[in-house]
Amino acid sequence: MAQTILIIEDEIELAKILAAYLEVEGFKAVTAADGEDGLRQFTDCAPSLVLLDIMLPKIDGISVCKELRMTSDVPVIMISAKSGEMDKVVALGIGADDYVTKPFSPLELVARVKAQLRRYEKSSGAGEAAAGEIIAGALYLNHNTYTAISSGNTIELTTKEFEILWFLASSPGQVFSKEQIYQGVWGYEGIVDENSVIVYINRIREKLGRSEATYIKTVWGAGYKFSEVSG
Ligand code: CA
């Protein structure tokens, strides 16, 4: 049965876009355009997760979140038009699980929805990671579509670059030699070309951006390992 996501958002167009993205991913999306309707829908549709705008007519998002938390611990992702630490502190302080600031990429939000659902299912002892996807910090990888998204930005990787990143990210923390990476990605036929592994990894790091370079860590004398960037 499809999981229901409740979208409480008074920007109707945004709510529609989010609903469309979620439905493509197999979720059922229910929308509410103000806080009062949101609380009513929450009771009616028993969603698996709530996307909650902060500035809402009738009852604001913060009050809605507090109200929900009195009876439920389903994941809540707050959506805000304002950027800044204050909002984040407030959102997390009232029991929200995650927080995005407008404008954001719908794909990134979908990735966060999935991450929250997975975390929630894990903590309630059910479910496991969807096949073909990896979420590590702000990085989202989809092996079915060869999509890489970092902090909401799509990273244009070549097939081989994606495969190397995927190979490393599939075993976070594990150290692979250049030879192992080469054989894991290119297969066993052919001569191991360690230099091309170095070139590819440098290119992947460059594309992920300076701040994300620590996703692939060099382990001197041993090789490389994937490490989730925290914070
Ligand atoms: Ca709003």
Image (tube, grey):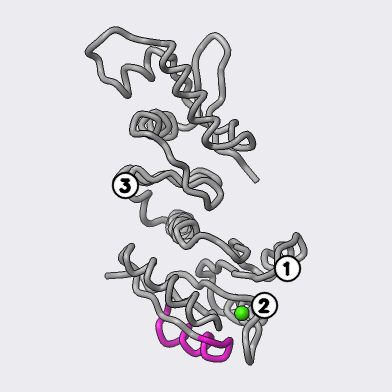
Q: Nearer the viewer, residue 193 or 31?
A: 193
Position above or below: 41 against 209: below
Do callouts 2 and 3 mark residues in contact (Cβ within 8 Å)? no
Neighbor class of circle 1 (other Cα within 10 Å; few <14, some 14-19, many 20+) is: few
Q: Which label sits in the foreground, 3 or 1?
A: 3
- Check disc 3 and give the amino acid type: Thr
Residue 46 drawn in magenta: yes
Highlighted range, magenta = 33-47
Image quadrant for the N terminus? bottom left
* Label 2 residue SS: helix
Left or right of 64 on screen, residue 142: left
Left or right of 116 on screen, residue 184: left
Disc 2 C-beta below 8 A from ligand 1: no
Q: Position of residue 204 (x, y in %)?
A: 48, 30
Residue occupied by mark 2 = 62
Query: In the image, which disc is placed on residue 90?
Result: 1
Q: Nearer the viewer, residue 85 or 62?
A: 85
- Check disc 1 and give the amino acid type: Val
**Mark 1 or 2 closer to N-term?**
2
Do callouts 1 and 2 mark residues in contact (Cβ within 8 Å)? yes
